[in-house]
Image (cartoon, rainbow, N blue to C red):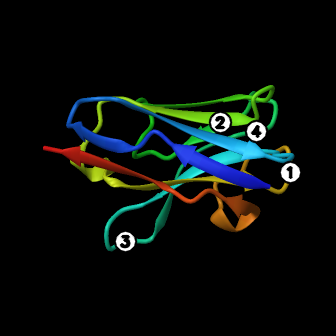
Amino acid sequence: VQLQASGGGLVQAGGSLSLSCAGSGRTFSMAWFRRAPGKGLDFVAAISWSGQTIKYADSVKGRATISRDNAKNTVYLQMNSLKPEDTAVYFCASGRSRYMSHHAGDHDYWGQGTKVTVSS
């Protein structure tokens, strides 16, 4: 499985971005994680294979929407009301089962990351 993340860029605080992650090969549950400069990997959002179960980190709840299109083998992350603290490299990851997980260790395949910079 190969994952290709895209959609990052520079945006002003309060703005929006839409990230995409296209997979080649079979994917199961999917998730987004991020790594801010000088910090560790943090969970952002996860979605089950069916799309019926979704989980968000408290830091993005109400501002982020994760979705997927299984026909296109693609998962999306819409981020609104962006804050400078959202600045990070965002990674998509494919889980080991149909059930979503917010643990990085439950994901075997990772995209290369797409950088999001939010200016104040």
* Rendering quarter of residue 70: top right
Residue 28 falls in image quadrant: top right
Type of residue at label 4?
Answer: Ser
Q: Which residue is mark 4?
A: 48
Q: Which residue is mark 1?
A: 97
**How many tags in the picture?**
4
CA distance for labels 3 and 1: 28 Å
Residue 75's tag is 2
Q: Position of residue 4 (x, y in %)?
A: 62, 49
Q: Amino acid at mark 1?
A: Ser
Q: Residues within 10 Å of mark 1 (few under 14, many from 20)?
A: some
Q: Nearer the viewer, mark 1 or mark 2?
A: 2
Q: How far is disc 2 from disc 4 in space, using C-alphas? A: 11 Å
In the structure shown, which secondary structural element does the residue marked by tag 3 occupy?
loop
Q: Residues under labels 4 and 3: Cα distance?
A: 27 Å
In the depicted structure, whether residue 75 falls above or below residue 106: above
Task: Give, as a three-letter code, the residue at label 2.
Answer: Val
Graded by Cα atoms within 10 Å as few (under 14), some (14 to 19) or many (20 or more), the crowding at tag 2 reads many
- Quick check: 120 left or right of 109? left
**Where is residue 18 shown, x and y percent of the image?**
45, 31
* Element type where label 2 sits in the image: strand
CB atoms at circles 4 and 1 under 8 Å apart? no
Mark 1 to mark 2: distance in Å?
Answer: 15 Å
Q: Residue furthest left?
A: 120
- Tell me the tag on residue 39: 3
Q: Earlier in the sequence, mark 4 or mark 3?
A: 3
Which residue shows up at 56% across the image and 59% down it? 112
- Proximity of marks 4 and 3: CB atoms separated by less than 8 Å: no
